[in-house]
Amino acid sequence: MPERLTRERILETARLLRPHVRKTPVIEVSGTDFGLADCQLYLKLELTQHSGSFKARGAFAHLLTRAVPEAGVVAASGGNHGAAVAFAARRLGKPAHIFVPRISSPAKIERIRREQAMLEIGGERYADALAASHERAAKTGAIEVHAYDAIENLLGTGSMAAEFEEQAPALDVVLVPVGGGGLIGGFSAWYGGRARVVGVEPELAPTLARALDAGRPVDVDVNGIAADSLGARQIGAHVFPLAQRHVERVVLLEDPQISAAQDALWDRLRMVVEPGGAAAFAAILSGRYSLGPGERVGVVVSGGNTVAVDFGR
């Protein structure tokens, strides 16, 4: 583990973030509530976080630990990270310029606009927004706030893992959605083998699965209903060694399985969850992750930036 990514450093970051982020709730449900095996599921509701997703933790970690110049910050995002950086920058009085691709959902774009950041929409995928953000940073001197591949992101998501363990101790396994890997990297660093960590990805965006198969980060084509939040083309360089060491395996999902999980969370719990946020639960509901008898399972519900009209279909 990198020197700056120890459990002690994660706890220091959690203390730094405490005045700026919410301690999000955990809801305990039985698998039988969803027609599954009799086990206990602990859902970490990070969709209730500021800006609608876990990304606020990494955004504040960047802005609170780095020197921010007069030009402010620049970020590329599928939507959630941009909303988080815009929120954190406004709270801390810093200018923000956000680049998002055209696949970003209207709900996420509206969140960014509401935070009064400069917003540019262009290109088809996250990689296009990232290239535009590099140009902007080089031109203006603003600092770049990466969506997932930075120690600050991992410290921020590690703080969520520490919070989760405090709320739901002695979990057997934690299921974590994977895009670029900032979330699962923080969980891997915190749990460090004390609970099994399982990644969950769409079959149409198998970033971590392909990297583990290849033994290194590789580019993948990304598509599907969760591409705006789980659509990074390559797993983060900081994340990959942690995933090799601590991620037990990766579960891959079809888009209809993710949609079914969104519907089930709305129907049984009245939770409006975006596709990427529902992915970890979809692994259980679909049977792609097989529950053990009496297993204590942590499920990260990572974001809710969508609209309620999508549900009840």
Image (cartoon, rainbow, N blue to C red):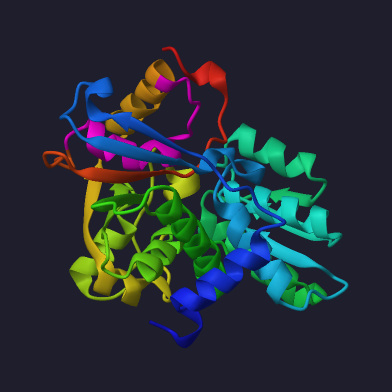
Residue 223, position in %: x, y? 38, 45
Residue 150, position in %: x, y? 53, 73
Residue under the point 31% across and 34% down: 255
Residue 282 is one of the magenta-drawn residues: yes
Span shown in magenta: 269-287
Magenta: main secondary structure equals helix
| Residue placed most toward the observer, 280 or 4 | 4
Residue 189 versus residue 88 in the image, above or below: below
Residue 244 versus residue 19 in the image, above or below: below
Residue under the point 54% across and 50% down: 54
- Is 105 left, or right, of 213 in this rendering? right
Which of the 4 quarters of the picture holds residue 235? bottom left
From this viewpoint, which residue is outermost toward the bottom?
Answer: 3
Q: Quadrant of the N terminus?
A: bottom left
- Is 52 left, or right, of 259 in this rendering? right
Q: Quadrant of the C terminus?
A: top left
| Residue placed most toward the observer, 220 or 34 | 34
Residue 44, position in %: x, y? 44, 43
Residue under the point 63% across and 33% down: 106
| Residue placed most toward the observer, 59 or 49 | 49
Residue 216, position in %: x, y? 28, 75
Which of the 4 quarters of the picture holds residue 246? bottom left
- Is 150 left, or right, of 292 in this rendering? right
Residue under the point 66% across and 45% down: 50
Question: Can residue 92 be seen in the rendering of this structure?
Answer: yes
